[in-house]
Image (cartoon, grey):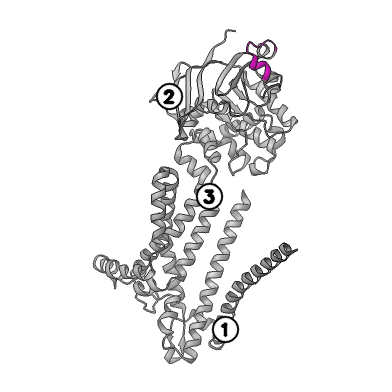
Amino acid sequence: MMKLFSEKSIKKALTVIAFSAIAALLLIVVFIILEGLPFIFKVGISDFLFSSEWEPQMGRFGIFPMIIGSLVVTLGSMIVGIPLALSGAIFLSEFVPRWAMRIIKPTIELLAGIPSVVYGFIGVMVLAPLIRDYLGGPGLSILAASIILGIMILPTILSISIDSLKAVPQSYREGAFALGATHWQTIHMAVLPAAKSGIIAGIILGLGRAIGETMAVIMVTGNAVILPKSPLYSVRTLTANIALEMGYATGMHRQSLFATGVILLIIIMVLNYTATIAIRRRVGKK
Amino acid sequence: MTDRSKFIIENLNAYWSDVQVLRSININIVSNKILGIIGPSGSGKTVFLRTLNRLNDLVPEIRIDGRILLDGKDIYDPDVDPVELRKKIGIVFALPIPLPASIHDNVIYGPSLSGIRNRHKLDELVEKSLKSAFLWDEVRDRLTTSAMRLSGGQQQRLCLARILAMEPDVIMLDEPCSGLDPISTSQIESALTELKKEYTIILVTNNTKQAARVADNTAFFLMNEMIEYGPTDVIFTVPRDKRTIDYITGRFG
């Protein structure tokens, strides 16, 4: 009797805790939307999204350059990070003996523990001057941000990819080897397709980290509200916009930052959703 | 017709780390015959099979010594490419593992690895292999559907067809019918009886009756040793070793 009671109360307690986590998320989302949405309708959706003029003091709130900035920097970090992470994961899971793996993988995961301000600092002190000296432009640029972010998302993608490659049953590999496949053909035809959904999940997590990253991005992008014409241009991302101006924003200006948050939220949700669909379709095909 | 040796295996030992898993195996495997290997689980049958196409190379813990001659050439010679060797010696596993692709693509996987690109030739291979594996009639009008949609018995025959498409010398089967119903099993057995005209077949099986039905020669493995080897009718009627009698009559353990 007593046992049954405690069993039930534990279940109840866990349910409450689980729902309060969801409630916290919901409250944040509702708050941002309540603060931001009225503003968007006041200014007009198309003016807010597609105008390039951001002068809050003058009452001009166009975040188009910031949307482009966020997307471009995220895309750049993917271009830098994905090939590195994927080839690293394949190398580490398929070619490196187990004992070496036990040393290398935790080391890579340590990269994820470095605070983003440290990444940003290295970007400002080392990378930006190099870009300025050798490629021109202000140095603080899309290119610098892409490289820094690409390295920051590396451990996320890499360690999830390794786990999913390692989870592919040995029998898959042997099946391909037994058909006379070489090591690389086996990886290409049997291992990668089987690990694909896990790898994509890793990429999505990396994507989420890249688009949401703020501190390192503020430090290395230069934060100019302009439409970039090359990777050497300085840009401002949506996250940077909120962080930079929240200290002194009031009234309409303050609301506009919440509205920026709404747009950021929507972009992240759309990206996550498309990625989830991509996974489901791949798995369904099998 | 005189019997020609396909494999000559001399004094083969295998070790998993420090444990000996094969103890001085000596056997001649005859061309165009079916060799049945029977014995309880853990007796070394599978390890033996996997040394013959060097699949054990992938397991770092396994070490072997002794000689394995395929058509007179030692397959562990440094100049033998294991990838090429595995193309000549196909293996079908206990659990069918189709690639996540269509039926057609599964069959042509091996040949296309060997560089065959001619579409006409590939289509011919698909039809011929699926026919030999007794699967053609069931799948002929849905070759482009995913191999994952086939039943277990069909997948196993597809794996056999996939091996046949590589036109190997030897076909090894590791308990191919362990997960199959009696009808699928008899289809596989019919296929094997047909196939021995062109191939040398090694069939590892937990089912002694299956060996009695299809094998020309039978080897009995027990505790990592080969206890007895001879023509199937001899092994099943007048075996020399008492342990063989005990095993095939089911009195074992």
Q: Are marks 3 and 2 on the same chain?
A: no
Amino acid identity at mark 3: Ala
**Residue bounds of the magenta highlight:** B237-246
Q: Is residue B252 above or below residue B121?
A: above
Q: Residues within 10 Å of mark 2 (few under 14, many from 20)?
A: some
Q: For mark 2, give the secondary structure.
A: loop
At which x and y percent is residue A110? 39, 59
Amino acid identity at mark 1: Leu
At which x and y percent is residue B145? 65, 44
Residue at the extreme top of the image, as rendered? B2
Report which residue position mark 2 lands on: B76
Assess whether residue A119 is covered by the magenta stretch: no
What kind of secondary structure does the magenta stretch mostly adopt? Answer: helix
Q: Is B1 left, or right, of A214 in this rendering?
A: right
- Figure quadrant of the C terminus of chain B: top right
Q: Is there CB contact under 8 Å for labels 2 and 1? A: no
Report which residue position mark 1 lands on: A37
Q: Is A15 left, or right, of A249 in this rendering?
A: right
**Residue A228 shows in the view:** no
Q: How many marks?
A: 3
The chain identifier of the residue carrying mark 2 reads B
Q: Earlier in the sequence, mark 3 or mark 1?
A: 1
The chain identifier of the residue carrying mark 1 reads A
Report which residue position mark 3 lands on: A195
At which x and y percent is residue B180? 70, 33
Quarter-of-image position of residue B235? top right
Quarter-of-image position of residue B45? top right
- Which tag is nearer the camera, tag 3 or tag 1? 3
- Figure quadrant of the N terminus of chain B: top right
